[in-house]
Image (cartoon, rainbow, N blue to C red):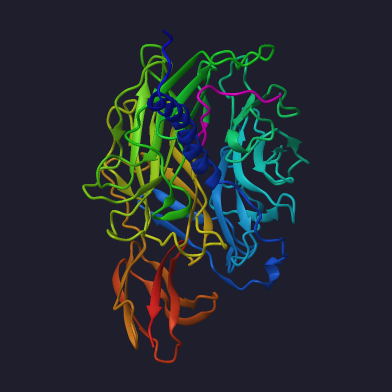
Amino acid sequence: MKNTPTLRQIAVLALLILLPAASASATETARERHHEVPDDPYVASPRVEHPRSPAMRFARGSFLAVQVNVDALGQNIVGDAANEPSIAVDALDPNRMVIGWRQFDSVTNNFRQAGYGYTTDGGLTWTFPGVIEPGVFRSDPVLDSDAAGRLYYNSLTIEGNDYPCDVYRSDDGGMAWDGGVRARGGDKQWMTIDKSGGVGDGHIYAYWNGFFSTCPPGFFTRSTDGGDSYENCTTIPDDPYWGTLTVDPLGRLFTIGTNGDDFTVARSSNAQQAGQSVTWDAVTVVDLGGPIRSSTGPNPGGLLGQAHVAAIPGGPQGVVICALCSVNPAGTDPLDVGFSRSTDGGLTWSAPVRVNDDAGTGWQWFGTMSTSPSGRIDAIWLDTRDNPGTYLSSLYYSHSDDGGLTWSANERLSEAFDPHLGWPNQDKMGDYYHMVSDDQGFNLAWAATFNGEQDVYYGRMTLGATAAGDTPAAPLALLNSDPNPFTASTTLRYKVPVAGFVSLEVYDALGRRVATLVSDEKQAGTYEAQLDAQALPGGIYFARLHAGEFGDTKKLLHLR
């Protein structure tokens, strides 16, 4: 007698068939949620029509922060927005750098363009010429450099239902760019350039979210001719997305990305061979202590960071591969910075290490990593630990000198800012930061709202710069305002680290100066200044403290 399946067996079989499809659908929904859409039409908002206010600049210990999106006089342009920055450093002259970002000419319009700024003096001053293609929708900037000193800018655009990417090249430190080369592409792309000195030196590699690829099912491409052309798309095993790439000292290519709940690192040992099709000889799931998060907390319309992969010298094979991401751990802690390492070329990985050392349940988001040639691992992130119960975030830093086995005590690099300010008609502050390390420190491209709007900043951390026995001067700082919010008046306390000329001014939300509280020579010390606001309308104000090249800003709320 034949074994005829029962109705129950048929139902169970159907359910088993449908379950993977349902799971895939949920994953695709998460992937699909975060893509670039030109909701608003382009509307010209000439820079000359915008008010000005003092640009933000501050030092804290060995960290210097300088606003990048400024006018020709170095002033903040009130009413625009800039976020999602990426940085490239000239390999032949590290004083020449360029930062690219999503430029919103008006905070009331989410049409974005390919903004950029360059420096020739190591980041002390920046020139912001404008955008690469005025009036053209562009997003997801990713910058890198080759060993010959050329700088590259990978930029996403939209053509109908396609998400192609163009890569622009600059041979003069970012002052001028060529017409760009179509580089296949898709949403949430990332790019890296081989600077190993091996046979693949100068190769450009890029991958993106395959859900929005211009060349499905492929979502990876390579250029072996310095960016003059890009190969047909291919795939990466396990379909990763929201991640980065790196080339190790042996010329091997590594990618990292999430596939929903896990992270996957893939290795190609032959991508450096121009005459061979790229194959992947190692694919490993990596535990970073939890999954990636998006659409919540401090960045409700974006990612809470992306996955980073990097390589340093060391280990039994001469190379240690490192992975880092802001992840959601088990329990009540919303987000930590998780790290793992591999000493066998990516085949096996260590148990996850928690980089942040806070005892609370803060948000450690936008975790970002880079490595120095000598093997130091640098990590920065935004952190709410100093303002529990809020999304007010400060920039934090830690490093490892032993290949990620142990990490330095976390160091606060900035005052807190509100990431929910200055949204350019979309509920996020971009999706990532970007940094490049050297043996003396690191260069960081980041965004913050110290001016009450989203602006792009350059950050330089110089390590070991203090002579033995010396103690760095305490940073210039506006300590607090009491009360805040206030009605008739408030008292501002500020600290001056060394003698010099000091100014303390108050600006309204449109960048108009409404009061000068201090304009005088001051000795090192702590001071107070009184703001009488009886003649001022209620609203948000900004107190701006300046001394020499450095400054600090505090937001004030005046109630009537």
Bounds of the magenta segment: 232-244
Is the magenta region chiefly helix, strand or loop? loop
Q: Is residue 390 left or right of residue 271?
A: left
Q: Position of residue 303 (x, y in %)?
A: 47, 47
Asked whether the viewer can see residue 519, the reply is yes
The answer to which image quadrant residue 78 occupies is bottom right
Residue at the far front: name it.
1
Q: Residue at x 40, y 87 (%)?
A: 533
Question: Disc count in the image?
Answer: 0
Q: Position of residue 404 (x, y in %)?
A: 33, 28
Image quarter hosting the N terminus: top left
Say which of 149 and 474 sits in front. Answer: 149
Asked whether the viewer can see residue 436, the reply is no
Q: Position of residue 153 (x, y in %)?
A: 65, 40
Q: Is residue 538 left or right of residue 468?
A: right
- Whether 107 is drawn above or below 386: the answer is below
Q: Position of residue 358 (x, y in %)?
A: 24, 47
- Whether 393 is drawn above or below 311: the answer is below
Say which of 137 and 274 sits in front. Answer: 137
